[in-house]
């Protein structure tokens, strides 16, 4: 029976404690007064814990390694939640507990921790870790044969994710890839943003990095007084944030009329010409009644709002069509790590064995969850990554 210390009682640490407790002496350390503080916030408090679409393109890393084998085992994460007794509510491939609250997941985990008699120590802050004669010593008082770091990244610092794990990793001389915010709102200097703030609508976002298309997302977008937010924005933010950190040019093009399935701006002008003739409309703003948010129409049209479409010059129609079909937003930055849902960057994956997540340079030291240089889109991907990395460690330790 091995003595195992797990630092951090978030999603990954909790999963591993459950997996290892039958055959080992597990001590789980948490600096908060209770477990799963960030887990309670997942999925806007509903805990989106899995997704049917586990394509590798939903995951990101700068570590220059393949995640294919790791991601291919994603069903193990789903099995873990099934084993907890979580009954899923599945909407568009997104898995939530049927209770529609993350409290159900955390309470189920607490129940199993009690059943397995895991030694959970809360309000315990790890300040010092040493590795002496193949033994790990925490704060000069707790000793173990195996140490697992599961302290989380830098996102949601109020939940305790304040970057402690990165300091411990650096003490072991491990390479940390630049930690930056992800699943985050993006800042721009679009001239319309002060007036369009608060509008929520469906659109297509196309992210261009150095003028080359990087990623497209369709769905809900929130227009803000500083730029853009919402799920679509979050799902392009990882690439944008990484690019900005490297000094690259990032630009988002918004198509507010993507649902019309029009293939070019010229075709959109033709569509408006035909709409004007069919309904005998008097003013330009009337062309957009019925399919575009009226507030956005007023903001974008400006001086053209009350003019007659048929009387406009071709270049004026071109300007109007561009505003709705391909509005360009230069991306200047993000809303910051304090408002990010997850952290991009972290421990270079070349520092660990991706089959076991054991650190190559330090025997019996493991790293899991958000500390690793892996992050995913919105939709259960990050929680799946945290859960699966813990499961892989549990399998490795039990096997050995």
Image (cartoon, rainbow, N blue to C red):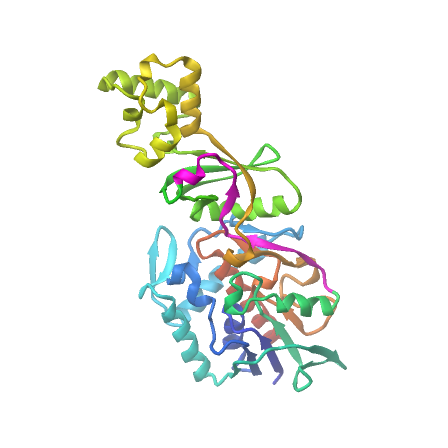
State the quadrant of the C terminus. bottom right
Is 189 above or below relative to 114?
A: above
Magenta stretch holds residue 76: no
Residue at the spot 56% in from the left edge and 73% down from the top edge: 8
Foreground residue among 208 and 104 = 208
Q: Give the quarter of the image for residue 343.
A: bottom right
**Residue 24 appears in view:** no
State the quadrant of the N terminus. bottom right
Q: Give the quarter of the image for residue 139.
A: bottom right
Across and down, in percent, residue 90 comes to 34, 57
Across and down, in percent, residue 233 comes to 47, 45
Across and down, in percent, residue 324 comes to 40, 29
Residue placed furthest toward the left:
279
Residue placed furthest toward the right:
133
Which region shows up in magenta? 174-196
Foreground residue among 313 and 267 = 313
Residue at the spot 52% in from the left edge and 51% down from the top edge: 335
Q: Is residue 269 left or right of residue 55?
A: left
Residue at the spot 64% in from the left edge and 40% down from the top edge: 248
Is 122 above or below relative to 363?
A: below
Across and down, in percent, residue 321 comes to 41, 24
**Residue 128 appears in view:** yes
Q: Is residue 199 left or right of residue 328?
A: left
Is 322 above or below relative to 137?
A: above
Residue at the spot 62% in from the left edge and 77% down from the top edge: 126
Is 24 above or below relative to 299?
A: below
What number of labels is visible? 0
């Amino acid at each position: 029976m091995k003595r195992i210390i797990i630092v951090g009682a978030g999603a990954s640490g909790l999963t591993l404690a459950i997996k290892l407790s039958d055959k080992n002496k597990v001590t789980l350390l948490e600096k908060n007064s209770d477990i799963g503080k960030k887990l309670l916030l997942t999925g806007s408090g509903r805990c989106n814990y899995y997704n049917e679409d586990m394509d590798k393109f939903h995951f990101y890393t700068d570590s220059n390694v393949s995640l294919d084998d790791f991601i291919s085992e994603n069903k193990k994460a789903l099995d873990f939640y099934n084993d907890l007794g979580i009954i899923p509510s599945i909407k568009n491939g997104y898995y939530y507990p049927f209770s529609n609250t993350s409290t159900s997941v955390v309470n189920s985990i607490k129940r199993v921790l009690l059943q397995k008699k895991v030694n959970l120590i809360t309000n315990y802050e790890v300040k010092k870790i040493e590795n002496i004669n193949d033994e790990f010593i925490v704060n000069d008082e707790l000793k173990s044969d195996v140490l697992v770091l599961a302290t989380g990244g830098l996102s949601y610092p109020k939940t305790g994710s304040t970057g402690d794990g990165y300091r411990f990793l650096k003490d072991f001389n491990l390479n940390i890839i630049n930690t930056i915010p992800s699943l985050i709102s993006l800042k721009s200097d679009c001239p319309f943003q002060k007036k369009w703030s608060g509008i929520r609508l469906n659109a297509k976002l196309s992210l261009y990095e150095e003028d080359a298309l990087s990623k497209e997302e369709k769905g809900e977008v929130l227009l803000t007084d500083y730029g853009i937010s919402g799920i679509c924005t979050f799902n392009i933010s990882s690439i944008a944030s990484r690019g900005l950190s490297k000094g690259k040019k990032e630009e988002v093009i918004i198509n507010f009329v993507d649902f019309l399935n029009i293939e070019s701006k010229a075709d959109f002008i033709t569509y408006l010409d035909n709409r004007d003739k069919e309904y005998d409309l008097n003013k330009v703003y009337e062309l957009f009644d019925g399919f575009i948010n009226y507030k956005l129409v007023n903001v974008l049209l400006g001086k053209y709002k009350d003019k007659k479409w048929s009387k406009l010059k071709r270049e004026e129609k071109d300007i109007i069509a561009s505003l709705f079909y391909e509005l360009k937003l230069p991306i200047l930055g993000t809303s910051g790590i304090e408002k990010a849902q997850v952290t991009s960057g972290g421990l270079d994956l070349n520092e660990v064995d991706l089959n076991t997540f054991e650190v190559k340079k330090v025997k019996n030291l493991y790293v899991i969850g958000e500390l690793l240089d892996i992050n995913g889109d919105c939709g259960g991907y990050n929680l799946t990554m945290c859960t699966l990395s813990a499961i892989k460690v549990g399998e490795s330790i039990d096997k050995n």
